[in-house]
Structure formats: structure tokens, C-alpha cells
């Protein structure tokens, strides 16, 4: 498993990273929208922003929350319609080995 992308930040400012963890837990908890949907939304944002590691990690979290590979594919499809083809390239790279 790759190193946590916040490991350096955690070493120099553990309170910042703890606040990020708290906000993450709050934002992605089941509510009016299920956690799975929120994770797929975040994955689409990361695909648009070119965050390969984020797309991969969020897709894995979404699958643990019950998302299917078809739902992941449709999420990237929507990102492409809204933002252009970039998310397809990022998603393809990020999902290699994650969805089969």
C-alpha cells in the first residue's frame, strides 16, 4: 500500500490532519445522501482535478460502501460530460487494478 499522502503533514501538524479526518468522517457519513454517493461525487471531482491517487482511493472506499464497477464507470461518464475527456484518462489510470 502506498504511503499516506498526509504523512508529512501529520508529522509537522498533527492537529491539521486530525481536523481533516474529522471533516472527512462528517462529510462522508450516511445522511440525506448515502456515503457511497458522496464518495462517487468526490471521485468525479478528483478525476477532473487530475488526482490519480484520489480517484483510486475514493473508488476503493466507494466499493467498500457498496458501489459497483458500473456505478464507478457512470460517475466518470458524468464527469466527462461536465468537464471534458480529462476525467476518462485520469480514471482509466487510477482504476487500473482497482476494478476488474
Image (cartoon, rainbow, N blue to C red):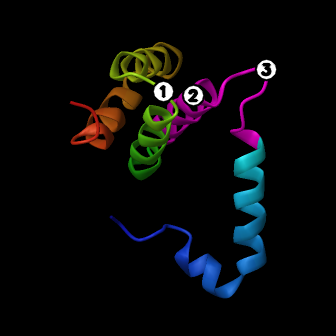
Task: Determine the residue positioned at 40% across, 30% down.
Answer: 87
Please identify the quadrant where the N terminus is shown. bottom left
Q: Quadrant of residue 100?
A: top left
Q: Say which mark, if any, is on residue 32.
A: 3
Which residue appears farthest toward the bottom when viewing the image? 12
Q: Nearer the viewer, residue 47 or 22?
A: 22
Q: In the rendered image, which residue does mark 2 sit on?
A: 36
Task: Note whether 93 is above or below 72 in the view shown.
Answer: below
How packed mark 1 is, by other alpha carbons closer than 10 Å (few <14, some 14-19, many 20 or more), is some
Q: In the rendered image, which residue does mark 1 sit on?
A: 66
Total number of numbered discs in the rendering: 3
Q: Quadrant of residue 88?
A: top left
SS for callout 2: helix
What is the span of residues highlighted in magenta in the rendered image?
A: 27-49
Q: CA distance from mark 2 to mark 1?
A: 6 Å
Task: Determine the residue positioned at 54% across, 76% down.
Answer: 7
Q: Is residue 36 in the magenta section?
A: yes
Q: Nearer the viewer, residue 5 or 79?
A: 5
SS for callout 3: loop
Pinpoint residue 33: horizontal percent, then vertical percent: 72, 21
SS for callout 1: loop
User: Mark 1, mark 3: which one is toward the viewer?
Assistant: 1
Q: Is residue 77 in the magenta section?
A: no
How packed mark 3 is, by other alpha carbons closer than 10 Å (few <14, some 14-19, many 20 or more), is few
Task: Determine the residue positioned at 28% across, 40% down.
Answer: 98
Tag 2 near tag 1, CB within 8 Å: yes
Pinpoint residue 82: horizontal percent, then vertical percent: 53, 16
Task: Note whether 55 is above or below 100 in the view shown.
Answer: below
Amino acid at each position: 500500500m502506498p504511503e499516506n499522502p498526509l504523512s508529512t503533514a501529520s508529522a509537522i501538524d498533527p492537529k491539521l490532519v486530525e481536523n481533516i479526518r474529522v471533516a472527512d468522517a462528517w462529510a462522508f457519513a450516511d445522511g440525506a445522501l448515502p456515503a457511497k454517493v458522496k464518495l462517487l461525487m468526490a471521485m468525479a471531482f478528483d478525476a477532473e482535478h487530475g488526482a490519480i491517487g484520489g480517484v483510486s482511493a475514493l473508488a476503493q472506499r466507494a466499493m467498500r460502501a457498496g458501489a459497483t464497477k458500473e456505478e464507478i464507470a457512470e460517475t466518470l461518464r458524468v464527469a466527462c460530460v461536465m468537464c471534458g475527456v480529462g476525467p476518462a484518462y485520469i480514471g482509466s489510470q487510477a482504476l487500473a487494478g482497482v476494478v476488474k
